Amino acid sequence: MDVTDKILKFIHFETRCAAIYRHLSVLFSDAKELFGTISKEEDGHAAILERALSCFKAGDLSLEFFAFLSPQIDEALDLVSKIESRLTAKDLTLPEALELMLEMEKSVAEKYLIGYLIDMSFVKGGLAISHEFAKMVCEGGCHVTQIKEFMRNGATEERGR
């Protein structure tokens, strides 16, 4: 599998995460704003990766570090599949959904992606993409904090609709 295929897997991961958050924003009115905001940010992460892929294909950006991430992204995509299956359950509560989202945000792919993206020495060219990666890193770290904060402030036992 080449770098392009691996980047496409990360785009797929971010897109699926966004869809999960969108779904949760409909299921849980108490957390609609939280899930809706994170969904938009995950969509933005996919868009950043799509732009980075375009720059990579044009030879304007070195993204070779993605070559090291294949096992991690595969594990993360498996986790997303399990979460998607759980979301179809009628008895899912808001605290359970929040725990699932914490697990997803802390997944191996997110950790490794953030770790590699922080090291901007890997990015050769594409200064605008470097800034977008930095934004992506900040938002990704904030998602865990936002979810934990929401949980501390009393997530209800609301059940999905």
Image (tube, rainbow, N blue to C red):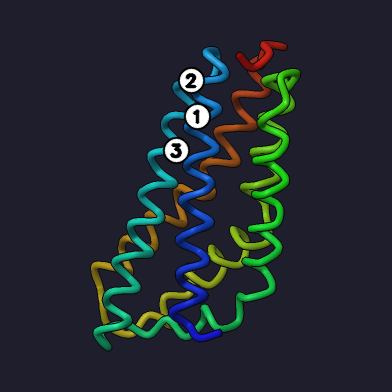
Find out whether the residues at labels 3 and 1 contact each other: C-beta distance under 8 Å.
Answer: yes
Looking at the picture, which amino acid does disc 3 mark?
A: Ser
Above or below: residue 80 compared with residue 125: above
| Front residue of 78 and 144 | 78
| Residues at discs 2 and 1 in contact (Cβ within 8 Å) | yes
Disc tally is: 3
Rendering coords of residue 39 (x, y %): 44, 38
Q: What amino acid type is highlighted by mark number 2?
A: Lys
Name which of mark 2 and mark 3 comes first in the sequence: 2
- What kind of residue is marked 1? Phe
Quadrant showing the C terminus: top right
- Tag 1's secondary structure? helix
Secondary structure at badge 2 equals helix
**Residue identifier under label 2:** 32
Front in this rendered view, residue 95 or 117: 95
Q: Which residue carries the number 3 mark?
A: 39
Q: How far apart in space, not on screen, are marks 2 and 3 (Cα)?
A: 10 Å
Name the residue at 54% across, 63% down. Answer: 114
According to the image, label 1 marks what residue?
Answer: 35
Mark 1 surroundings: few (<14), some (14-19) or many (≥20) residues within 10 A = many
In the rendered image of this protein, does residue 74 appear above or below residue 94? below
Quarter holding residue 71:
bottom right
